[in-house]
Image (tube, helix red, strand yellow):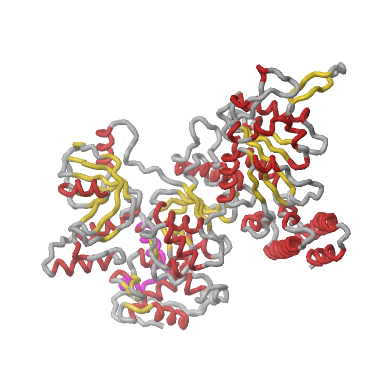
């Protein structure tokens, strides 16, 4: 136990008897301060860890080493939860040592509950300090041309050195020392250096010349950096938005860099006119993943932070100066056998460089559950002394709503997604929140386009919804269809061909004049003919034969009359029909470069030169093909030449499939059983010479229609016995040995 050394503050003893069951126990913070006092003011991280391990008894839930980690849970969590003490100014961490401040000494021996309350209050006020300032005045004068040409603002005091890793007290000590040595470093230098370093990315900068002239208005676009080239050593990148000089009332500017009050902004706005306010920075909206079942989400809301949890040694550093490609390569080298980290690399890059103060965060778990909504209140920070790298890349957040609810639609599976490009989408996600009235003002920037009633949802997101396709796959699929205009989705039974085709059709027609009439689905069969598809003579109610348009001709006429909308025609079982008989002379009109009236042809029955037929350019044809259908002949070469082919594999191994079952109430062990059985079964089918990859079994068999699966084991067994087993019997036919091998797998 620590003992009081030299302090006049009345001592309140700490009761070390009760077991520590929560890492937010106020005794921990109080004992940390007292221990640092007893060590003469500072201690190494190891000394702190050893002392706490000897002093406190932690509950079994905290006194364990989590799987895949190397440190006990209480120690990992402790370092994250004492941020409030640091932010409150009670102690500092740098160079592997923890140092108590004079302020911390003054409170070390007070009541632990009081220390906790004071630190929380100061922490909450502190994050509103520099982080809350949205507009800054910077003295330009003789430096304005350089600021404008090179896109930055800066300040001198180069002898202070790079302050990127310095604490506030370190900056104060350094400037004081230089001042005592005769350097021209004023008493306000430390504060102005802090302003230059800590002003949030996205905040506005007003550059002035003299006391009555604004020469430029810009936006901070990058983090602090230090350069030895020239006298302006401490810099921030700025995008200059308005460089028209403007006279204002004479001001009493006191410092080179300072926050701007509202009265000056009001005057500036009047002089700029009644147009759009150039000082306003439109906020962005992000969805970010959080783990509801661990301490992560609780830490987020208690500490008022959010973390990008990429725990790779290769990323153990501040990544604000990294290019996207560098982050990708670091993640790839950390896990060379894992999936490509395209989305994760982009997520961390955006978290550190693109997200800004004032942006809205929608914390989610899974694909459709929202945990809370918050406002970003600080720049990105890398905590180099965080022993748990999951909490190294952080930002402060004011969690306005902490009430969980279900979103009305699925969200992307990525860890961080910018949903700003699709107006109204973020609002649609959050509207079901019980706190919507409180949240509504934060979504004023997220309004649907004026000419649309529904929020814009990107087409690839609509396709991805519940299809288990990644965003990249969906975009690739849509690109292929738009480029070729004719595409075939092929796959084994249960791979979601029909569902995905409908999603594609709805996505591409959503912004049209009449979406419900812009897509059609038919199914080919052996008796399907030209008369059904294009035109033919049909008997009327009087027994007379009349020439009638087929479904495709009618569809194309409708599309031709609405050229600004996209039309999608889906043909299920496209290779079951006799294509030569169904299309006749029109096969050539399907080609993407023949979609024009100049290629129109006379039809076999109507034969009217004034009524020629062509397939409009705004018609997409989407065929579906079952690769396990033995009754099918080889696909006509003429068809293959005119269509792009996209194969849909089973999706048992995707996170979205597991999340989908979890949303239905299926337990993790049951999901693992399904994945194990079906992965083994499909491997055996693929390796079989009698079957092959075209006969694997898709995931749709295990996508229950019910909102909740009541008896999961019974449900799985019924699918295996009454759906998978008959399909295997059909596959194997008389090959009994093969059937028995496959049956053994599903019975395992």
Whether residue 670 appears in this view of the structure is: no
111 is within the stretch colored magenta = yes
- Give the percent coordinates (x, y) of residue 736: 87, 63
Residue 730 in which image quadrant: bottom right
Q: Is 369 above or below relative to 508? A: below
Residue 531 in which image quadrant: top right
Left/right placement of residue 214 relative to residue 664 reads left
Residue sitting at x 64%, y 31%: 518
Left/right placement of residue 245 relative to residue 89 reads left
Nearest the viewer among 489 and 654 is 489
464 is within the stretch colored magenta = no
Q: Which residues are magenta?
A: 104-125
Q: Quadrant of the C terminus?
A: bottom right
Left/right placement of residue 333 relative to residue 358 reads right
- Give the percent coordinates (x, y) of residue 149: 24, 47
Left/right placement of residue 672 relative to residue 203 reads right
Nearest the viewer among 30 and 584 is 584
Residue sitting at x 51%, y 79%: 57
- Give the percent coordinates (x, y) of residue 7: 29, 77
Nearest the viewer among 588 and 163 is 588
- How many numbered tags mark residues here? 0
Q: Is 164 above or below relative to 585? A: below
Whether residue 596 appears in this view of the structure is: yes
Q: Quadrant of the N terminus?
A: bottom left
Q: Main secondary structure of the magenta part?
A: helix
- Give the percent coordinates (x, y) of residue 332: 49, 64
Residue furthest left as drawn:
182
Q: Is 631 above or below relative to 618? A: below
């Amino acid at each position: 136990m620590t003992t009081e050394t030299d302090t006049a503050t009345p001592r309140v003893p700490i009761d070390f008897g009760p077991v520590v069951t929560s890492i937010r126990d106020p005794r921990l913070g109080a004992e940390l301060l007292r221990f640092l006092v007893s060590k003469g003011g500072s201690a190494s991280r190891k000394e702190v860890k050893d002392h706490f391990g000897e002093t406190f008894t932690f509950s079994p839930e905290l006194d364990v080493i989590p799987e895949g980690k190397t440190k006990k849970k209480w120690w990992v969590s402790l370092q994250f939860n004492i941020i409030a003490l640091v932010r409150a100014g009670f102690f500092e961490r740098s160079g592997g040592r923890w140092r108590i401040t004079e302020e911390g000494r003054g409170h070390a021996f007070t009541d632990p509950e009081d220390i906790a309350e004071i630190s929380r209050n100061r922490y909450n006020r502190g994050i509103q300090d520099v982080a809350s300032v949205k507009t800054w005045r910077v003295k330009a004068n003789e430096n304005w041309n350089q600021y404008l040409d090179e896109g930055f603002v800066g300040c001198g005091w180069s002898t202070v050195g790079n302050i990127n890793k310095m604490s506030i007290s370190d900056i104060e000590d350094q400037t004081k020392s230089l001042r005592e040595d005769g350097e021209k470093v004023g008493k306000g230098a430390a504060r102005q250096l802090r302003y230059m370093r800590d002003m949030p990315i996205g905040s506005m900068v007003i550059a002035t010349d003299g006391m009555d002239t604004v020469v430029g208005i810009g936006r901070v676009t990058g983090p602090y950096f230090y350069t030895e080239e020239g006298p302006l050593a401490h810099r921030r990148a700025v995008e200059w938005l308005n460089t028209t000089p403007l006279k204002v009332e004479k001001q009493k500017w006191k410092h080179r860099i300072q926050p701007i009050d509202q009265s000056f902004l009001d005057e500036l706005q009047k002089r700029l006119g009644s147009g759009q306010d150039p000082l306003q920075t439109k906020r962005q909206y992000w969805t970010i993943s959080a783990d509801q079942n661990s301490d992560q989400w609780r830490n987020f809301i208690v500490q008022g932070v959010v973390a990008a949890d990429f725990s790779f040694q290769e990323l153990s550093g501040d990544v604000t100066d990294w290019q996207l490609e560098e982050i990708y390569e670091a993640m790839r080298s950390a896990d060379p056998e894992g999936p490509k980290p395209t989305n994760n690399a982009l997520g961390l890059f955006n978290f550190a460089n693109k997200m800004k103060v004032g942006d809205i965060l929608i914390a989610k778990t899974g694909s459709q559950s929202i945990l809370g909504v918050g406002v970003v209140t600080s720049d990105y920070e890398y905590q180099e002394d965080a022993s748990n790298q999951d909490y190294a890349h952080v930002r402060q957040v004011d969690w306005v709503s902490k009430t969980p609810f279900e979103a009305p639609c699925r969200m992307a599976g990525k860890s961080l997604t910018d949903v700003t490009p699709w107006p109204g989408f973020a609002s649609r996600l959050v509207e079901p929140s019980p706190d919507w009235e409180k949240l509504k003002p934060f979504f004023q920037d997220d309004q649907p386009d004026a000419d649309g009633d529904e929020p814009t949802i990107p087409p690839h997101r609509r396709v991805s919804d519940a299809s288990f396709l990644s965003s990249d796959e969906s975009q690739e699929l849509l690109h292929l269809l738009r480029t070729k205009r004719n595409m075939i989705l092929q796959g084994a039974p249960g791979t979601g061909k029909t569902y995905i085709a409908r999603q594609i059709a709805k996505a591409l027609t959503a912004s049209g004049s009449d979406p419900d009439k812009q897509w059609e689905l038919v199914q080919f069969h052996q008796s399907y003919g030209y008369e059904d598809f294009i035109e033919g003579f049909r008997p009327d109610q009087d027994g007379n034969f009349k020439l009638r348009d087929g479904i495709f001709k009618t569809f194309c006429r409708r599309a031709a009359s609405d050229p600004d909308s996209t039309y999608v025609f889906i043909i299920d079982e496209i290779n079951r029909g006799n294509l030569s008989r169904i299309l006749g002379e029109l096969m050539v009109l399907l080609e993407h470069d023949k979609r024009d009236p100049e290629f129109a042809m006379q039809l076999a029955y109507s034969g009217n030169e004034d009524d020629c037929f062509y397939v409009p350019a705004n018609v997409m044809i989407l065929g579906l093909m079952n690769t396990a259908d033995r009754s099918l002949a080889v696909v006509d070469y003429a068809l293959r030449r005119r269509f792009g082919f996209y194969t849909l594999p089973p999706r048992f191994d995707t996170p979205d499939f597991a999340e989908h079952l979890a949303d239905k109430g299926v337990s993790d062990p049951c999901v693992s059983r399904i994945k194990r059985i079906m992965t083994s079964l499909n491997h055996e089918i693929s390796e079989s010479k009698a079957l092959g990859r075209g006969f694997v079994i898709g995931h749709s068999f295990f996508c229950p229609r019910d909102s909740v699966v009541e008896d999961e084991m019974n449900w799985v067994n019924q699918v295996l016995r009454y759906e998978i087993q008959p399909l295997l019997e059909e596959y194997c036919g008389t090959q009994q040995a093969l059937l028995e091998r496959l049956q053994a797998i599903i019975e395992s």
